[in-house]
Image (cartoon, rainbow, N blue to C red):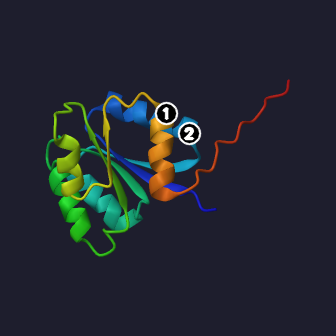
Amino acid sequence: MATKKILVVEDNEDNRRILIYRLRKIGDFEIIEAVNGEQAIEVVRTQGPDLIFMDLKMPVLDGWEATGRIRQMEGGDRVRIIALTAQAMAGDEEKALAAGCDDYLSKPVVDPNLVREKLERLIGPITAVQATAVLG
C-alpha cells in the first residue's frame, strides 16, 4: 500500500505542529506543510496530496477560497479536504461542507481517535507507524 500524502495548511505554527505530531502517531504518512491557501494550491498542483487539513482563517488566501479553487482544478474533486477552525461557531460545519470540504474538525486537534476515524473514512486503511526497538 502506497504511503498517503497529507497536506497540513495552517498559519499558526503551534497548531500545525500539534496536528503533525498527532498524524505521525496515527500512521505512516508523507506530510507536507503550507502556511496559507496560495501555498496549498501550489502543493495540490505539484504534489497531489490525498488529503488536506485546511485551516479556514489564514492570511494571504483563506481556506474558504483555497478550497473553492482546489475544487475547480483538474483532479481537485479527488482530494479529500478536512476543514479546521479554532473559532467554531454554530453553522460552521455546514458552511464548510457546502464550500467543498469533506469533513470538519475544531482546533486544537486533541482526539487522535477522531482524527483516525476521519482519515480512515476519507482515504481508507491507515498504515500503522512501525515501532523500532533499540537494543543496547
Q: Residue at x 51, y 35 (%)?
A: 113
Dot label at residue 80: none
Q: Quadrant of the N terminus?
A: bottom right
Regarding residue 56, the answer to whether it shows in the image is no
* Mark 2 burial class by Cα count in 10 Å: few <14, some 14-19, many 20+: some
Residue 99, percent across and down? 19, 56
* Mark 1 burial class by Cα count in 10 Å: few <14, some 14-19, many 20+: some
Check if mark 1's residue and mark 2's residue have beta carbons within 8 Å. Answer: yes
Q: Is residue 134 found left or right of 8 in the rendered image?
A: right
71, 32: nearer the viewer: 71
Compute the Cα span from label 1 to label 2. Answer: 7 Å
Residue 8, percent across and down? 37, 45
Number of numbered discs overlaid on the protein picture: 2
- Name the element at disc 1: helix
Residue 63, percent across and down? 20, 49
- What is the three-letter code of the residue carrying label 1? Pro
Dot label at residue 26: 2
46, 115: nearer the viewer: 115
Q: Quadrant of residue 86 in the image? A: top left
Q: Residue at x 71, y 36 (%)?
A: 131
- Name the element at disc 2: helix
Residue 117, percent across and down? 49, 44
- Residue at numbered disc 1: 112
Q: Quadrant of the C terminus?
A: top right
Which mark sits nearer the N-terminus, 1 or 2?
A: 2
Q: Quadrant of residue 66 in the image? A: bottom left
Regarding residue 42, the answer to whether it shows in the image is yes
Query: Does 90 appear above or below 52?
Result: above
Q: Residue at x 14, y 47 (%)?
A: 60
